[in-house]
Image (spheres, rainbow, N blue to C red):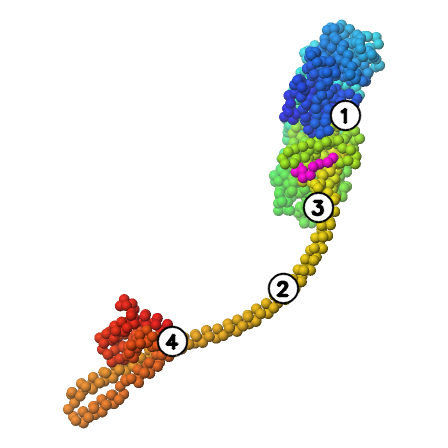
């Protein structure tokens, strides 16, 4: 059951009428006009006078008629996929005639009948016949080829074969003058079922004109009204009411229990029902629409509590829930309950499992273990808090009862069940337990403490050994681990994949095949093998794969509505015969039909609209194409969009689509739920777009296609490409000539470059030679500079020796003079005179100064010439004074060399400054240094 609200169809929430087009598109009469639904997209057509639409019908050509207030017309689709309304009030001769609402439209052969309150208008071609009412027309409808209408306070009338007269068939007194809600075919020839608004059901015989009351739907205690009636193939009748939901009648008009699907029917006021072509029902409500899918692959059987386990036995369905144990009569052929669920007395509270053990129904409950006898609970033993019961291999009639804090031994003796004492030695929760390969050994998974392996003694009263496994034994995570058997092998499902236990390594190792099938990054919480199918619950999604397949495909789409509703760690999956499966969830119990559907010739996938956008403007394309003449599209479209739907696909299950654009897409796309596809910037050319549909129940719709051509511009035509080819050849030839010329030019250029390179090489060699010469000069210069420094040092030393020698001669002379004054001996005086003569001969004279001049010139080239150039009047003595100043000798040191007093030295320096124009504030030594440079 799927409900549609105002946010879906974007119109007024009140609906009055419905009609189905030839392609499965639904048309609904609404206060805002005609609301149209193709299964994916909603459209709305407004009548010229903004009237609400109270009636809809379809003729043999598929034309939809709509009737409103003083308005009638047709609803059709244009070539672009948009629906439009065309008024036929002129043809009905209604212009200026107030007939108020047209409540019903029916098509009978070539005639169309429009019923208002006060008249019926019959059209055939351009002819319109008006049949006025004596009082007031009420219900009207077709039964076979007969048209019946109810007239208030008069009776039920039938249109004659000429279509020009209404004949009274049943008087109003025969049905207690009640208001007729529906007239249906009876179970025998010439019989009718007449159902009134007040809830009475009459059997009417057309030949005898008699009527018989069969049933009173509401009885004396319920004050309600019938708002609509439909009869399905097979005779089942559904009656909608104003306040009591939907009531189900059999072909004999007797009330039968509602199918489980209708037990949760909408609570809002129902205005009517419409039986679609697929034998499913649309419910027209005061606040929205509801679609009832009797062919849905799943049905909700129970919704009163969270379901942890289920059992079908002796045509009874038992449920273990959070509120106790429920049961109901169950029809295995139809997989539906035939009675309401009732709770077994004495089993209130949490029930964990319900199992069939040796023909008995055993319940594991918070309050203990119970045996169900004639839907009455009988407790086994006195202990409480049990999870489930597990058979002991090779020990008939013995079982392990999993407890919140350990394990109990359970035995059946004849018809009695005996709960023995608790097996000592193990006190942890044993909810998840599976027999190991070794005798009397069991694997137990704890939700928080990891995995235990216990070994029980032969008398089953003590646990001899307990092995505790955590992350130290190969598991990545020891939480949320479950154990089961798959293909005879014990496997462990975890948050990080599926494992088996390697006995030799004493550790858990990943199960290669199952981890290749089921993503190990997801939490596999349930694994159940049933025949060739393996069922699983992984990350709250249920599904299955075929066990024997080499590359199994996961089938999950059908069960997506269950995602997030499973009881964690206690997922309930119960296989049933004939490809059925029970799922217990927090929302109740669901039964699924998982048989694979096939392609149906009646279900077609249709393209509802093709549009393109260019320069941010959207335009529609014609949906009508001719074989061999593709639909042309302008060049340079930004976005090309295809909208599609499958109107005849049942709307109770998810519809998916796969598409391909030939010459663009490499293959059919994966199935998706989005009912459109967009392509951007396609090149000029001819394309064929194909789309097919399916629902999650496995039913496949036929594929459809749309061929179109993107028109090339003038420079993209065949002639243009021929010209491009010719131009390309010419360009290639021209390029070839240019290349040859270029080659010759490049060859000459290369020769010139080679000559230039040779010259450059010679120049480089010459430059290298010059560089080597320059290097030699640099080295000579350094050597000369070093020689100058050395000679300068020698000259300085020589000069200082001269100074010291003159000082020494002066001192000796002075000493001898003093000695002469004290000597009185002639001989001694004569000897002193000889000494004076020797000193005079060896005194420092001009020859020493000339040696100085020569050495100074060697060190300071052209120094004296430069001074002469500055002032030719400089004397030799003045030149020497300049040389001594340049050598940084003090006046005191210079004085003995020149034989001049210190005062004389200062005067001489002053005169030289004047001759050389050296200002008084300038440094004389620095000036002479620059002259040398």
The relative height of residue 856 versus residue 238 in the rendered view (above or below) is: below
Residue 91 spot, x, y in % from top left = 74, 16
Per the image, the residue denoted by label 2 is 749
Answer above or below: position of 403 versus 794.
Answer: above
Residue that appears at 69% across and 47% down: 502
Q: CA distance from mark 3 to mark 2?
A: 71 Å
- What crowding class fits label 1: few (fewer than 14 Cα within 10 Å), some (14-19), or many (20 or more)? some
- Name the front one of labels 2 and 4: 2
Percent across and percent down for residue 344 are 68, 23
| Label annotation for residue 789 | 4
Q: Which residue is mark 1?
A: 22
SS for callout 4: helix
Q: Nearer the viewer, mark 4 or mark 1?
A: 4
Kind of element beneath mark 1: loop
Looking at the image, tell me whether mark 4 or mark 1 is earlier in sequence order: 1
- Give the CA distance from mark 4 to mark 1: 121 Å
Is 483 in front, or is 611? 611
Instruction: Assess disc 3: are there few (<14), some (14-19) or many (≥20) residues with their C-alpha within 10 Å of its C-alpha.
Output: few
The tag on residue 512 is 3
Report how far apart the C-alphas of labels 2 and 4 lie in the structure: 57 Å
Magenta span covers which residues?
631-639
Residue 107 found in image quarter: top right
Q: Are marks 4 and 1 in contact (CB under 8 Å)?
A: no
In terms of sequence position, does the residue under pointer 3 or pointer 1 come before the other? 1
């Amino acid at each position: 059951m799927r409900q549609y609200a105002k946010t879906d169809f974007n119109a007024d929430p009140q609906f009055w009428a419905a009609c189905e087009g030839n392609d499965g598109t639904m048309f609904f009469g609404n206060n805002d006009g005609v609301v149209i639904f193709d299964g994916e997209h909603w459209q709305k057509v407004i009548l010229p006078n903004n009237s609400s639409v109270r009636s809809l019908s379809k003729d043999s050509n598929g034309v939809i008629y709509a009737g409103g207030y003083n308005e009638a017309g047709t609803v059709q689709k244009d070539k672009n996929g948009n629906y439009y309304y065309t008024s036929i009030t002129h043809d009905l001769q209604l212009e200026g005639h107030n007939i108020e609402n047209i409540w019903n439209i029916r098509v009978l052969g070539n005639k169309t009948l429009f019923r208002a309150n006060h008249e019926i208008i019959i059209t055939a071609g351009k002819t319109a016949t008006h049949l006025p009412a004596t009082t007031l027309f009420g219900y009207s409808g077709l039964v076979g080829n007969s048209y019946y209408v109810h007239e208030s306070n008069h009776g039920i009338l039938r249109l004659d074969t000429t279509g020009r007269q209404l004949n009274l068939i049943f008087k109003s007194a025969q049905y207690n003058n009640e208001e007729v809600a529906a007239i249906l075919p009876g179970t025998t020839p010439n019989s009718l079922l007449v159902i009134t608004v007040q809830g009475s059901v009459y059997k009417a015989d057309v030949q005898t004109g008699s009527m018989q009351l069969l049933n009173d739907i509401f009885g004396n205690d319920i004050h309600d009204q019938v708002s609509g009636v439909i009869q399905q193939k097979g005779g089942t009748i559904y009656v909608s009411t104003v306040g009591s939901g939907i009531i189900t009648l059999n072909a004999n008009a007797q009330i039968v229990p509602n199918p489980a699907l209708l037990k949760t029917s909408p609570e809002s006021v129902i205005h009517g029902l419409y039986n679609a072509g697929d034998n499913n029902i649309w419910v027209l409500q005061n606040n929205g629409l509801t679609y009832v899918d009797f062919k849905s692959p799943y049905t909700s059987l129970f919704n009163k509590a969270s379901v942890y386990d289920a059992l079908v036995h002796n045509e009874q369905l038992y449920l273990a829930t959070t509120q106790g144990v429920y049961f109901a009569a169950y029809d295995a052929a139809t997989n539906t309950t035939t009675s309401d669920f009732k709770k077994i007395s004495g089993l209130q509270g949490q029930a964990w499992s319900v199992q069939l053990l040796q023909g008995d129904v055993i319940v594991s409950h918070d309050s203990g273990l119970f045996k169900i006898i004639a839907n009455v609970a009988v407790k086994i033993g006195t202990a409480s808090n049990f999870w489930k019961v597990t058979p002991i291999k090779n020990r008939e009639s013995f079982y392990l009862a999993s407890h919140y804090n350990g394990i109990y031994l359970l035995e059946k003796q004849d018809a009695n069940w005996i709960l023995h004492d608790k097996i000592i030695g193990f006190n942890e929760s044993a909810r998840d337990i599976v027999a190991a390969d070794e005798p009397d050994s069991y694997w137990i998974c704890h939700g928080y403490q990891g995995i235990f392996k216990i070994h029980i003694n032969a008398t089953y009263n003590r646990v001899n050994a307990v092995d505790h496994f955590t992350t130290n034994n190969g598991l990545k995570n020891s939480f949320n681990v479950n154990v089961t058997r798959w293909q005879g092998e014990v496997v462990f499902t975890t948050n990080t994949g599926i494992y088996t236990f390697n006995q030799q390594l004493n550790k858990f190792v990943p199960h290669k095949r199952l981890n290749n099938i089921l993503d190990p990054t997801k939490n596999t919480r349930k694994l159940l093998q049933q025949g060739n199918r393996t069922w699983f619950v992984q990350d709250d999604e249920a599904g299955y794969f075929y066990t024997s397949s080499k590359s199994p495909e996961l089938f999950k789409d059908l069960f997506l509505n269950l995602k997030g509703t499973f009881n964690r760690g206690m997922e309930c999956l119960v296989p049933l015969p004939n490809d059925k499966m029970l799922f217990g969830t927090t929302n109740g119990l669901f039964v699924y039909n998982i048989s694979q559907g096939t392609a149906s010739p009646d279900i077609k996938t249709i393209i509802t609209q093709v549009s393109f956008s260019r320069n941010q403007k959207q335009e529609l394309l014609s949906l009508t194409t001719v074989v061999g003449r593709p639909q042309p599209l302008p060049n340079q479209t930004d976005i090309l969009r295809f909208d599609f739907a499958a109107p005849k696909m049942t709307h109770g299950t998810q519809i998916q689509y796969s598409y391909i654009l030939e010459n663009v897409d490499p293959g059919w796309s994966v199935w998706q739920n989005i009912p459109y596809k967009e392509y951007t910037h396609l090149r000029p050319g001819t394309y064929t777009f194909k789309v097919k549909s399916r629902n999650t129940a496995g039913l496949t719709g036929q594929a459809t296609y749309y061929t179109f051509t993107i028109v090339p511009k003038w420079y993209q035509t065949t002639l243009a490409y021929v010209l491009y080819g010719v131009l390309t050849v010419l360009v290639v030839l021209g390029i070839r000539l240019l290349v040859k010329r270029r080659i010759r030019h490049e060859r000459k250029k290369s020769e010139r470059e080679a000559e230039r390179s040779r010259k450059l090489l010679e120049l480089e060699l010459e430059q290298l030679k010059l560089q080597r010469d320059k290097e030699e000069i640099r080295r000579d210069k350094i050597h000369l500079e070093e020689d100058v420094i050395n000679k300068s040092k020698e000259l300085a030393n020589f000069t200082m020796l001269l100074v010291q020698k003159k000082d020494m001669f002066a001192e000796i002379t002075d000493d001898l003079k003093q000695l002469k004054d004290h000597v009185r001996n002639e001989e001694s005086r004569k000897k002193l005179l000889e000494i004076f003569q020797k000193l005079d001969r060896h005194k420092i004279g001009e020859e020493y100064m000339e040696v100085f001049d020569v050495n100074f010139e060697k060190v300071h080239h052209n120094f004296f010439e430069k001074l002469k150039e500055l002032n030719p009047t400089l004397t030799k003595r003045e030149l020497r004074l300049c040389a001594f100043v340049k050598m940084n000798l003090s006046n005191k040191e210079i004085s003995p060399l020149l034989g001049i007093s210190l005062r004389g030295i200062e005067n001489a320096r002053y005169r030289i400054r004047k001759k050389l124009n050296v200002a008084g504030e300038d440094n004389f030594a620095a000036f002479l240094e620059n002259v040398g440079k």
